[in-house]
Image: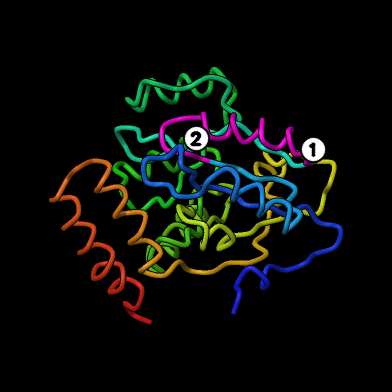
Amino acid sequence: MDDKKNVRKVNGMKKGIFHFHSTYSYDGINTLEKIIKIIKEKKLDFVVLTDHDTIKGSVELQKKVKEHNLNVEIPTAAEYKTDRGDVIALNVKNEITDMKWDEFYKNAKEQNAILVLPHPYDGHSQIEELAQSVDVIEVFNSRSSVVNNYKSYLLALKYKKPVIWSSDSHIPQTLLNGVVGYEKKDLKFHEALTNSEIAPLFLKKSSVSDIFISQLKKAYVNKNFKLFIYIVYKTLFKRTKEDYLNL
């Protein structure tokens, strides 16, 4: 069964995908050509590409969209690895290079960027402080465990933050694991996001094998055997346990 056919067709709504990776990420397998194909097939209105530590992917995708004469919003964005964990900077104008949190935050806000805390309970420290500082919290990540996604939802409620859902896709098979949308067509994506206008249209958990493929590339690129062993443990055992804990 083709899961892509399950994406809801909602008339009168803008729909798209947020937080995913291309080959501009060290662990990404999604090519820009594949992303363009998905945009065309699903008639997406916005696509937020968030490559690791660089806005190059989203900038190049903007160029590709123009070449294909597609009417789709492509904000400039990236997922940066700060010293407190991953943080997405949306509508950033220039590359951010200082990953010390205070400097990163200052640089992002000087550019009027919107900061999103992705998968709060996967790879972050000082989570409560981060949650208070950012503008938006990701409450569903298709690669995170059920437990961690639920904790993320509670965190957003605690600090009354707007929320977002994502696939965090690194491979073509999972690009549509998180599709979101909003009704007010006059709004740009960032406006709908910060005004809490966005709702999930289609959500699907990524399988263990889906995650394993991108993590394997990550270990290969870093030439790190110990990382590979850890990835096997984290992907095949730890996440599975968390998914079914107390369910």
Q: Which residue is mark 1?
A: 69
Residue 56 shown left or right of residue 75 in the figure: left
Identified by mark 1, the residue type is Asn
According to the image, what is the colour scheme of the structure?
rainbow
Q: Position of residue 126 (x, y in %)?
A: 31, 41
Three-letter amino acid code at the position of disc 2: Ala
* Front one among 222 and 134: 222
The residue depicted at 43 percent of the width and 47 percent of the height is: 28
**Which range is magenta?**
50-70
Residue 187 image-quadrant placement: top right
Q: Residue at x 31, y 77 (%)?
A: 245
Crowding at mark 2 (Cα within 10 Å: few <14, some 14-19, many 20+): many
Q: Nearer the viewer, mark 2 or mark 1?
A: 1
Q: Are marks 2 and 1 in contact (CB under 8 Å)?
A: no
Relative to residue 80, is residue 95 depicted above or below? above
| Element type where label 1 sits in the image | loop
Q: Is residue 69 part of the magenta span, yes or no? A: yes
Give the residue at mark 2.
78
Q: Residues within 10 Å of mark 1 (few under 14, many from 20)?
A: few
